[in-house]
Amino acid sequence: MVRLYSSGATSTALAGDFKVAKSTILRILRENGVVVRRQPLTAKQVKEAKRLYGSGFSLSEVAEQMKVNQETMRVAIIKVGVELRAPAGGRK
């Protein structure tokens, strides 16, 4: 896994290949002294995240559907001018 990541494989791709959570891959890499690369969203991913969020999906739902970190996705859509809705967690 370390060799594959060091050769350019992404943590997301490795998670899919090994059928584990991305967080598991990142933990293993860090435990083995690997400096984890930042993996910003591509322009295509940002466009899709913006579309999904705009259609009513929550930040969590968009991140889960796109298989990306929620904070990475949130920052990316804010950068392109998306105004975030108030969190829905407090509603009853």
Image (cartoon, grey):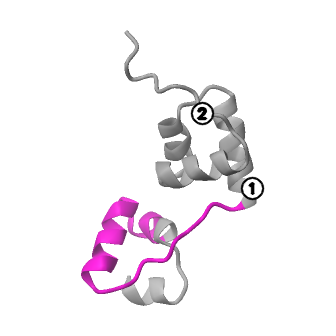
Regarding residue 20, the answer to whether it shows in the image is no
Query: The disc labelled 1 sits on which kind of residue?
Result: Lys
The answer for how far apart the CA atoms under marks 1 and 2 are is: 20 Å
Residue, disc 2: 84
Query: The disc labelled 2 sits on which kind of residue?
Result: Leu
- Magenta segment: 14-42
Q: Nearer the viewer, residue 66 or 80?
A: 80
Q: Secondary structure at mark 2?
A: loop
In the drawing, what numbered circle is on residue 23? none
Q: Is residue 47 above or below residue 38?
A: above
Q: Position of residue 66 (x, y in %)?
A: 57, 49
Q: Could you classify mark 1 by the number of other residues whose Cα lies within 10 Å: few (under 14), some (14-19), or many (20 or more)? A: few
Q: Could you classify mark 2 by the number of other residues whose Cα lies within 10 Å: few (under 14), some (14-19), or many (20 or more)? A: few
Q: Relative to 53, is 14 on the left or the right?
A: left
Question: Disc 1 vs disc 2: Cβ atoms closer than 8 Å?
Answer: no
* Residue 19 lies in the magenta-colored region: yes
Regarding residue 65, the answer to whether it shows in the image is yes
**Which part of the image, by quadrant, shows the N terminus?**
bottom left
Who's the residue at 42% across and 90% down the image? Answer: 3
Q: Relative to 43, is 57 on the left or the right?
A: left
Residue, disc 1: 44
